[in-house]
Image (cartoon, grey):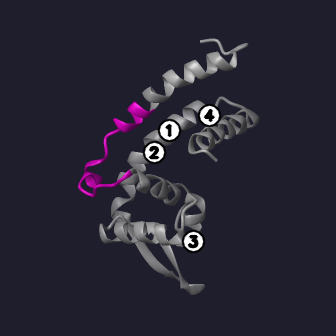
């Protein structure tokens, strides 16, 4: 498909047909055997992705990135900690803070599961210039905001 001179309506049509296929393919990604019994919900994926790509962090930092209340993240972290997916430890520099990380026993399975999507995004984004990547990401964020009514 040529995108030269693509009208807004042609772009909308293409994306309305493409998005369900993309979501369908993403949903068909098999959850690794080690994670299947844990009943992970979509709300857990973003939290796990931040920990996978950014490393251990605090509940408050996760809450800010996920744009939810710290209490919400604390509940998710507690749930995933009880299942053995996450580990919590005191911050050596400030004992009032808790550092959250992916448990070593689940690191490989989570990397495998989320890494497939990351590899697909890398394939799509690497040929673009930094400016084109910025425009693409900004466009997806604007779309998400428009869907949410913000």
Instruction: Identify the residue under disc 1.
Output: 119
Please identify, in this view, whether the residue under mark 1 or under mark 3 is nearer the observer.
3
Residue 79 location, x and y as percent? 35, 68
Instruction: Identify the residue under disc 2.
Output: 115
Q: Give the CA separation, mark 1 to mark 3.
A: 28 Å
**Residue at horizontal 49 percent and vertical 21 percent from the top:** 17
Image quadrant where one finds the N terminus = top right
| Secondary element at tag 2 | helix
| Secondary element at tag 1 | helix
Q: Is residue 126 above or below residue 43?
A: above
Q: Give the CA separation, mark 4 to mark 1.
A: 10 Å
Instruction: Identify the residue under disc 3.
Output: 60
Sequence order check: which comes first, mark 4 or mark 1?
1
**Residue at horizontal 55 percent and vertical 65 percent from the top:** 63
**Residue at horizontal 68 percent and vertical 30 percent from the top:** 128
Q: Give the CA separation, mark 4 to mark 3.
A: 30 Å
């Amino acid at each position: 498909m040529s995108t030269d001179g693509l009208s807004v309506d042609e772009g909308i049509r293409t994306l309305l047909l493409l998005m369900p296929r993309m979501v369908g393919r993403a949903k068909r990604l098999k959850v690794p055997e080690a994670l299947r019994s844990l009943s992970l919900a979509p709300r857990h994926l973003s939290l796990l992705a931040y920990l996978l790509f950014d490393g251990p962090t605090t509940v408050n930092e996760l809450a800010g990135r996920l744009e939810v209340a710290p209490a919400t993240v604390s509940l998710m972290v507690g749930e995933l900690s009880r299942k053995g997916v996450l580990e919590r430890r005191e911050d050596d520099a400030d004992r009032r803070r808790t550092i959250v990380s992916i448990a070593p026993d689940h690191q490989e399975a989570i990397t495998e599961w989320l890494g497939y999507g990351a590899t697909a995004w890398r394939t799509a984004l690497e040929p673009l210039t930094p400016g084109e990547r910025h425009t693409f990401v900004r466009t997806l964020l604007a779309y998400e905001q428009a869907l949410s009514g913000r």
